[in-house]
Image (tube, grey):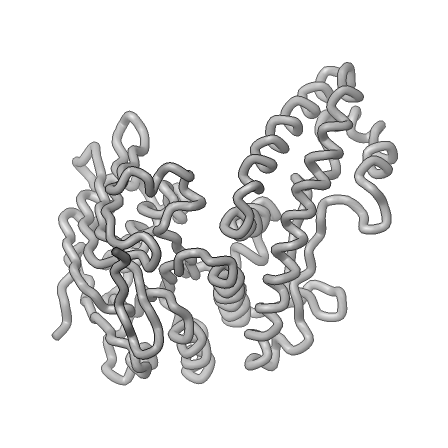
Amino acid sequence: MVTEREEGTQTIGGLRSLKINSLRNLLRVTVETEAPVILLSGGNGAGKTTFLEAVYLLARGRTFRSVKTGPLCARGSERLEVCAEVETLERGRGRIEVARDGAGVHRLADPPSWLDDGAAEMPLRVKLVSENPQSLLDGEPELRRRFLDLGVFHVEPRFARVHAQFRRVLAQRNAALRIGGAGVALWNAPFVSVSNAMHAFRASFVTDWNAMFRELAQGFSFLEACELRYDRGWPETESIEETLKKCGERELQRGFSLAGPGRADFGVTQDGRRQSLSRGQTKVAVTLLQLAAERVHLARGKEPAIFLLDDLESELDETTVRRLWELGCASRSQIIATRVSCRPESVFLASDRDVAMFHVEHGQVRPIS
C-alpha cells in the first residue's frame, strides 16, 4: 500500500529521517521530520552544506564538492555512513544507506529492488543548486554534458544503454586514431549510429526542457526572450558522416575524435548568442533550469526529487528569492535549504508548507522550536 502525505493539494514525499556518521565535521547527526521543507541555519563552516552533501551522497553515491574541500571522512575516522528513511509516492517507504571506506563506496537499500535499475532510476532523486552555480554555465562543457545527460536518463530508460555504447565506441575509435588511424574506418559506422541515437534522445529532452524553462523565466526581466540552445557536437548543416570526413586529417594529427556527442554543449542564449549573466543572475538561471527539468521529469511520471538549495539568498534581493521560493513550493518536491541567518522574517517561512527549522553549529544539528 502506497503511503502518501497530503500537504494542501500537494502530495509530498522525501526524507523522513537522516543519520550521518563521520562525514566531514558531522560526526554523529540524527534528524527526524515529516516536514516538506527543512531549513538549516548556521554560520559559515558549521556543516550546513555537508548536510546537503549527505543527501546527495545517498542519491548519487558521490559528492558534489571538489577535492579542495578536503577528505570526506571525518578526521580520525576511516569510514563514513549516511542512512535515511525515505517516503516515495509510488513505492511506499524504504531505507537507503551509503558508506565509504578504504574499499570504496557501498550502497544498500531496503527493499533491495530500489537499486535494481541503477542510481538514475532509484526513488531518491536530488536536484542541487550549489553555493557556486556559476560553475555550471561558465565552467567546462563536460559539466553541462553530465547535467544534460542526467536529465535525459530520468525520462528515457534506453538512454543509459546508448550512452554506455557511445563511451565504448568512442574509446575504440580514439585508440585507433592514436596509433595512426589503422582501424578507424571500422569504428566510423557504429560511431555514426550511436551519435545519431544520442543526439535524438538529448534533443527530445531539450525541446521539453526549453519550453518549461521559458515559461518559468517569464517572471525575470533579465531572462526575457532567453532560451536554451543545444549544440549537438557537430554542425547543424552537416550530417555526422560529413563532419567526420572533413576533420579526418585533423583527427589523425590530434589523436582523438573532434566531433560527436562527446563535444555537445548547451547554454542560455538570447537572439542566438550566449547570455552574459552576473553571479546572482546565474544562480537564478540554474535554479530555473533545475525547476524546469523537474517539471519534465514529473510529466514523465518520475518520483519527485528533493531540492537541495545551498544559501539561495546569497547575492539575490528579497523579491527574487521570494519568486524562486514560490516556484519551488509550487512543486511536489521536498526542499532542504540552508541560510546563514536565522531571522524569523525569512521568505522561506512565507509559504503554506510546514517548515522544520534546525540550527547547525560545530557539527551539531539541533531543532529550533
Q: Residue at x 63, y 64 (%)?
A: 210
Please provide percent x and percent y for residue 230. Answer: 68, 55
Please provide percent x and percent y for residue 323. Answer: 45, 80
* 205 relative to 234, above or below: below
Please provide percent x and percent y for residue 75. Answer: 20, 39
Answer with left or right where residue 367 lies relative to residue 67.
left
Q: Residue at x 31, y 69 (%)?
A: 339
Which quarter shows the C terminus?
A: bottom left
Answer with left or right where residue 224 lies relative to residue 41.
right
Looking at the rendering, which quadrant does residue 225 occupy?
bottom right
* 293 relative to 7, above or below: above
Q: Which residue is drawn at 60% across and 31% down?
A: 165
Q: Residue at x 58, y 44 (%)?
A: 142
Answer with left or right where residue 160 lies relative to residue 50.
right
> Which one is in front, 148 or 86?
86
Please provide percent x and percent y for residue 245. Answer: 86, 32
Which quarter shows the N terminus?
A: bottom left
